[in-house]
Amino acid sequence: MFHLALWLTSMFNLMLKRLLKFCLWRVGLYFILGLISLVMIGPLLWLLSTSLKSSGENIFAYPPQWLPQFPTLANFRQVWQNYPFFRYLLNSLGVAVITVIVNLWLSALAAYPLARFQFVGKSVFFWLMVGSLMIPFQITMIPLYILAVQLNLRNSYLGLIFPYAVSGFGIFLLRQAFLSIPRELEEAARMDGGSPWQIWQHIMLPGIQPDLITLAIFTFVGMWGDFLWPLLMLDEPQMFTLPLGVASLASAFASDWRLIAAGSILAILPVTVIFMVMQRYIIPNETSSGLQG
């Protein structure tokens, strides 16, 4: 009995040490992740705090005042009333939605032959397309701008969509997704008399739905926050997108950082809501996960 009690005591102490070590490791991990999260969202929290501060508060005070002493929505009201922010919102929303639709359509059309068909120069075209991912937009911006001017696309919504109508990243992502779908499904559809177009539309596209949504989110967020290309293409203020509208606040309000912060929050809020709603669809559903098996 004595040896049994000693053995049980030693086992209990060993388990207690392991449990304590595990808890300390988890606490330390969560602490580090919390610090990283705080660093990442810190600028956004400061932007929100600045947008809620009244005109009498010093936003450059040291040490910084994270919480407004007299929170107010007057900055948002002034930006919304004194500047055509609703017009900018509609411009950005329309351009981003159309760009997403066109990009998904063209990228899926280009990715399907690369994944399933055999043709001359397939490998060369694929690797050239992959190589284009390493070319910065600033390098291709000048020839794209010259081409857009020659096509008379300046000060037009089509000119904003033109460079993003299809992307190498989208083609590569959807090609890899098409490759994950078993060929047996295509063969069964082909035996039932399905044409390549019908197979692509009714078999392949539903099978890569999570990848389509992922590409849609990336395209929407990228187009929503794009500043450089609209700056080159647009001269008419009524066609400005939200990034250009926020940038114009600096001169319009003599660099009142409270109003600039309020405009930035208005620009960030819609895309944040859309991302939070759509991100749950990125996880593969039961149908797509079954297809991949």
Image: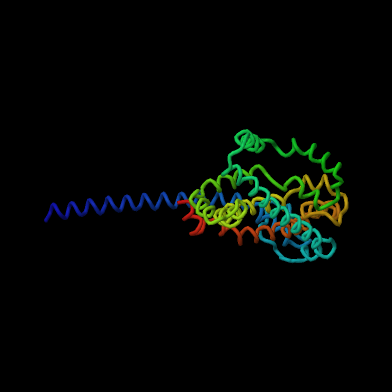
Q: Which residue is located at x 58 percent, y 42 percent?
A: 117
Q: Is residue 73 above or below residue 197?
A: below
Q: Is residue 183 visible?
A: yes
Front-lying residue, 88 or 132 = 132
Question: How far from the left and from the top, in percent, is residue 212?
Answer: 61, 53
| Residue 162 x %, y % | 77, 47
Q: Is residue 63 visible?
A: no
Percent position of residue 99, x then y: 72, 53
User: Image quarter for residue 53?
Assistant: bottom right
Viewed as shown, does residue 164 lie left or right of 214?
right
In this view, 116 is above or below 96: above
The residue sitting at 31% across, 50% down in the picture is 17
**Colour scheme:** rainbow
Count all numbered tags in the image, as a single digit.
0
Residue drawn 58% across and 39% down?
A: 118
Which quadrant does the N terminus fall into?
bottom left
**In the depicted view, which residue is nearer to us: 112 or 34?**
112
| As drawn, 144 above or below 181 | above
Q: x, y percentage for residue 97?
A: 71, 57
